[in-house]
Amino acid sequence: MPRFSVIVPAYKVQAYLQEALDSVLCQSYPDLELIAVDDASPDACGQIIDEYAARDPRITPVHLARNAGLGPARNAGLSRATGDYLIFLDGDDTLAPGALQAVADRLKATGSPDVLVYDYARTFWTGETTRNRLAHRLGEDGPASFRIADRPALLGMLMVVWNKAYRREFVEREGLVFPPGFYEDTPWTYPALLAAESVAVLDRVCVHYRQRRSGSIRTTPSRAHLDVFDQYDRVFAHLASRPELDRWRPVLHRRMAEHFCAVYADPHRLPRAARPEFFRRAALSLRRYRVAVRSDAQPLSLSRTDRLRHALMRFGLRRTYGLLSGLRALGTRLGRSALGGLRGLRETALRCHYRIQRLLPLRPDLAVFSAYWHGGYACNPAAIEAKLRELAPGTRTAWICDPAHAATLPKETAALRPGSPAYWTALARATYLITNVNFDRALVKRPGQVLLQTQHGTPLKRVGLDLQDRPAATPTTDFAGLLRGADQWDYLLSGNRHSTLVWEKALPSSYTTLEYGYPRNDVFHRAAPSDVLELRERLGIPAGSTVILYAPTHRDYRRSRPEHLDFERVLRDLGPRFTILARTHLTYADTPPTWERHPRLLDVTAHPSVEELCLASDALVTDYSSLMFDYAALDRPIVIHADDWEAYEASRGTYFDLRAFPPGAIARTEDELVDIFATGHWQGSRSAQLRAAFRARFCTYDDGHAAERVVRHVFLGQTTPIPPITPLEDRHPTPARPGHSSPTGHSSPAGV
């Protein structure tokens, strides 16, 4: 018995079917059967299915004698399914890489629920990919499994069959089958969710929902769209047969009204001649199934506009409905125009101001810095700014940041609020521009201006042009814009040769690469042991405690905060001598953690300096964060917790297999992680050997003098005496505790 039965119906999808079948058969989780149903397709679908079945015994080909439609085709697959769970995939859609492994893991973690709901992304024929806008409803916080009454908002999501996994025994017990006609998902999904004794969610894109330019049901005008009324008749007949579900009638009535309005509003579905009939039948259905809201009914949430729209449709007032829709669209356009006009006046004034400022001479003594999208004083730009004031005290510095971060700046550095006149003046007049992300796209770089791009980490995951085949993993698909930004760089700062090769290929341009190391890591060689003691005391770390800095990166394939560790269990098993500093990635900084409070668990997400946290810790536990490359410069133990490598690599892509070249011990499960620390393997000789090889490759230039090299070259125009690179064996990073040698045997001086 396989774990999954994946049912793929096919009709006139020959251009997409091979991709759909490959997406199933190439899953990293192999315990499956694929039931491919040829719905008497007139094209080559049947032949493609037979060719695949001849090559892979996991495929069961099914050929229907006549075209029956999507519902009956799925039923034909259902009758042959033997798996624990049923998964449906349309013949023009695809499973995301690693999806079945993620589903299997979530099913295990939630106790084998009747239904598991997962997320999807729309993939457009233009190449654009967008995630479901209601993905936030799939947050995994709260009970692992639940009844739909505990999370009724799930009924407001797209009611399709292919974004869920169903326990086969549950489907057979409930007698669920698909009806004929369009919108066949409707009388399946509502009864399934209402009947399920346990429902769970998976906050991960598992399906790529293809948005075809033509040929799909949604883009083909047809009277078959009138089938939606028969399907809702089946839904309410199901409710009538089960009195215990009567309290759901108001909710389903509202969802039916929304569905009718959506179909009627879509110009690609209904032929013009069928629109009056559709509206008339919609009014009849809405009146027939309307009931008074009971005291135990599930809560409704409707805007005034929605209530009015539904009421007009229920009473059959088609002309009034059309007039309201037209007025609303007109009002929206006028409102946007008015708001846009006010914004336009301000933007026009600022553009004029910026143009005038660009006519004035550059200020050779002014340097403007920024970091992390208008964040505070941090990272490589902060280390360079501090060294610039030390070596060139006559230089004026300014920092672009939101007002909330202004308090992090040194008193000698002026704060610039993004978008203000002073901001545009500084961008126009400053000779030096330094950032670890990107400046405003409206920046016009003047002759004589020098732009230094410092970056903010060594790339393990793909970046720049290397993300062109993974649009869902990048915040923008404007690769031309990325290249225009790179064309403005005069210098790109690199921490190692690996970074140099990656950046010059992923963002090619004529900039000069400075292989000087990362200035933010200078403190690892220049801090005194007394500084480490002071940091540990300020953070509230118990004296003598072994401190683990836990700093995972974000996941491109999910939105909610991932909770990879059971901190209470880990701390209990490790015992009282361990303390964990937990630092959430800034992507999830606004989401409160779900872990229980513990005296030896310190949430340091809001701490302004990750470099200070590194200095205060004895070891780093991370997954795929670029912090590992910086931490290696400290020559302290690193443990990799790679519990979802396949999913991470499939969604984002990486430049090398971290498991084959790690900076220390690797844990694939929480049990392995605990064992690594409990047995002392984290600081053993094998871990030290792995770290030494990792340092030799990625810490080539991080010797404590990177900021000085940058300032002397970029700002002072010196090629000599730039401090030469200190050989790796002669470096003495700050130890974790005074009197302790680094794991490779180097002792640190009392201070530098």
Image: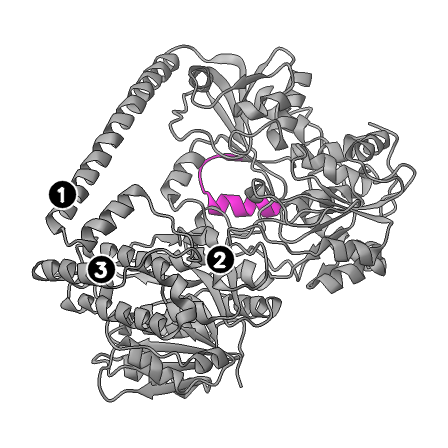
The kind of residue tagged 1 is Leu
Residue 614 in the image: x percent, y percent? 74, 40
Q: Earlier in the sequence, mark 3 or mark 2?
A: 2
Label 3, residues with CA under 10 Å away: few <14, some 14-19, many ≥20: some
508 part of magenta stretch: yes
How is the model colour-coded?
one colour
User: Within 10 Å of the Cα at label 1, are there few (<14), some (14-19), or many (20+) other Cα atoms?
Assistant: few
Can residue 204 be seen from the camera position used here? Answer: no
Residue denoted by label 3: 287
Depth check: give the residue in front, 411 or 303.
Answer: 303
Q: Nearer the viewer, mark 3 or mark 2?
A: 3
Give the residue drawn at x 31%, y 69%. Answer: 236
Regarding mark 2 in the picture, which secondary structure is present there? Answer: loop
The image quarter in which residue 711 lies = top right
Residue at numbered disc 2: 151
Q: Are marks 1 and 3 in contact (CB under 8 Å)?
A: no
Q: Earlier in the sequence, mark 1 or mark 3?
A: 3
The residue segment tinted magenta is: 497-512
